[in-house]
Image (cartoon, rainbow, N blue to C red):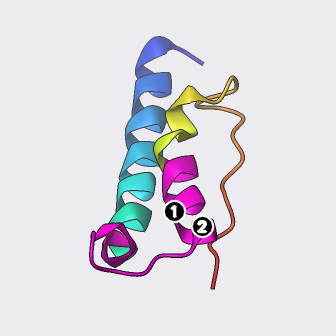
Amino acid sequence: MDQAELEDIKRVLRDIRNTQLKETDLWGLSDYPASQAQIDYRQDLRDITDQAGFPTDITWPTKPE
């Protein structure tokens, strides 16, 4: 896999991550009573790019109820 392909994969994964964050933006509002699991999920999404295997071997967090 060349560098251009890796950059494409990174871009797609960031887009997926950003969509998942947008879906849970309500949880990040200061006046929303978010659970610790919701807060952790959002942080785990933000940390996707810091995983050692990024972008080819990552573990997506499980969205809490």
41 relative position to 26: left or right: right
Query: Which quarter of the rendering shows the N terminus?
Result: top right
Q: Amino acid at mark 1?
A: Ile
Residue 27 x, y percent position in the rendering: 39, 74
Query: Which quarter of the rendering shows the C terminus?
Result: bottom right
Q: Which of the two residues, 31 or 15, is positioned nearer the viewer here?
A: 31
Q: Alpha carbon of mark 1 to alpha carbon of mark 2: how far?
A: 5 Å
Q: Quadrant of residue 30?
A: bottom left
Q: Quadrant of residue 25?
A: bottom left
Local crowd at mark 1 within 10 Å, few (<14), some, or many (≥20)?
A: some
Q: Which of the two residues, 47 or 34, is positioned nearer the viewer here?
A: 34
29 relative position to 53: left or right: left
25 relative position to 5: left or right: left
Taking 2 as reference, is 9 above or below it?
below
Q: Amino acid at mark 2?
A: Gln
Does the magenta run of residues contain 42? Answer: yes
Q: Are marks 1 and 2 in contact (CB under 8 Å)?
A: yes
Residue 11 x, y percent position in the rendering: 37, 38
Q: Residue furthest top?
A: 3
Indicate which disc residue 39 carries: 1
Taking 60 as reference, is 20 above or below it?
below
21 relative position to 44: left or right: left
Q: Which residues are magenta?
A: 24-45
Q: Residue at x 51, y 33 (%)?
A: 49
Q: Quadrant of residue 18?
A: bottom left
Indicate which disc residue 59 carries: none
Give the residue number, with chain letter if any, for mark 2: 36
